[in-house]
Amino acid sequence: MFSEKILALAAECEKDCREQFEYIDDIAFKNTQKVMKVFAENKLSDRHFAPTSGYGYNDDGRDLCDKLFADAFGAEAGFARHSIINGTHALSIGLYALLRPGDTLLSVAGKPYDTLDEVIGISGKSGDGSLADFGIGYKQIDLDENGYPRLEKIKEAVANDESVKVVFVQRSKGYSDRRTLTVKDINDICDVVRANSNAYIMVDNCYGAFTEESEPKADLLVGSLIKNAGGGMAESGGYLVGTAKAVELASYRYSTVGVGLECGASLGQTKSMIKGLFYAPHTVAQAVKTAVFAARVFEKLGFTVSPKYNEKRSDIIQTFTLGSEDALVKFCLGIQAGSPVDAHVAPVPWEMPGYNDRVIMAAGAFTQGSSIELSCDGPVRPPYIAYLQGGLTYESGKYGILKAAQTVTE
Ligand SMILES: *Cc1c(COP(=O)(O)O)cnc(C)c1O
């Protein structure tokens, strides 16, 4: 199936990655212990998996699931719902929950993820109901030239402007060519903001969850269940966890003021969400190992990769600078061919809702669009960077990477 040359390269790269793999397994064990402890303390039981319909009153399983997510993230409160349609929706709930007309949103890790442009009102039509339409201002502080937060600037910005109500931090690099922030970087931002203002700190935790031993100490920590925190098991959904006050406001925006978290039929999704949380530390480790392996393979093939195989990680994303549309497309073709579902189809660039450039995606996932499953995507713009993430099992991830290596080098 693979050439002798590719298999020899794989063996060599795996040897190089051994130390990293041990480190990743150690983090997975620590996070698994955390999750198991939370399940035991909350007395998770068979009855919690029972579905509800209609209004979903008295859904003990749903309530417990909320608590499990909050506790697993080390937060005061939180909720995880299958009815949150994606990460953008979860983030949008958080932003509209905390901001009021006249307030300012301050993004301190450069521009947020592309799909938030229209939510904030950086792009899109006036009158659509963006934050800008509601009179909410937007300011941004870029990371420094080495990719670290500018703490002094952040301090000045929050101390001198009382309108700054939300300090927004995106942990993962998303579709920008920058360093992923670590939990420590983000906690440093939290300390500075808390010492100098009353602003909420909201963290886009997409792709970050369970890659380190602990999670950022944000007022609102937000992510998708078809990424890390759903462990490849949740069929859909998102989570928002954090302080009791911020989560309460978020719950009103999620459903309605007054209703909050008391309604919302679980429709039988609770079990897969909780099972997902159980799997998450392990599944994330599989994805990180896949990324580390991929970094080593493509570095050896002569491409610029970020991060390098032996660098510390705080998300599951791996980038490869491919230099041309052709190479980007070939890379994605290889990943698609190495997927368990739709391995026979060829991805092409398309105009995706919410994104400003054409995007090419390889996604052969059991859950549509799930990016804790091996997937790769890239906006079709120079320098043609492919963003790879996921891998439910290291073995299948390795298979996909070798397919991509073969396609790109042929
Ligand atoms: C995936 C992601 C989002 C949300 O994207 P959805 O496709 O709406 O789930 C937001 N921010 C970052 C950094 C992401 O990786």
Image (cartoon, rainbow, N blue to C red):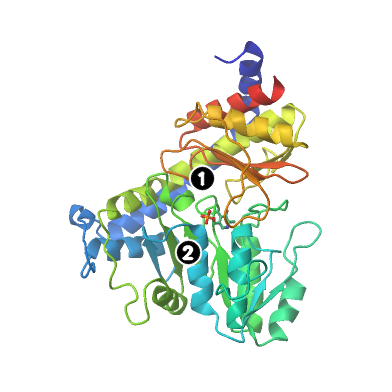
> Disc number at residue 145?
none
Q: Quadrant of ligand 1?
A: bottom right
Residue 92 x %, y %: 52, 68
The residue located at (37%, 73%) in the rendering is: 255
In the depicted structure, whether residue 198 falls above or below residue 348: below
The residue located at (62%, 34%) in the rendering is: 332
Whether the residue carrying mark 1 lies under 8 Å from ligand 1 is answered with yes
Quadrant containing the N terminus in the rendered view: top right
Disc 1 marks a residue whose amino acid type is Ser
Q: Earlier in the sequence, mark 1 or mark 2?
A: 2
Quadrant containing the C terminus in the rendered view: top right
In the depicted structure, whether residue 101 falls above or below residue 123: below
Farthest residue to the top: give it: 4
The residue located at (61%, 71%) in the rendering is: 120
The residue tagged 2 is 90
Residue at disc 2, secondary structure: helix
Could you tell me if the residues under marks 1 and 2 are in contact, i.e. CB atoms within 8 Å? no
Residue 369 x %, y %: 48, 45
Looking at the image, residue 243 sits to the left or right of residue 150; the answer is left
The residue tagged 1 is 371
Whether the residue carrying mark 2 lies under 8 Å from ligand 1 is answered with yes
Location of residue 250 by image quarter: bottom left
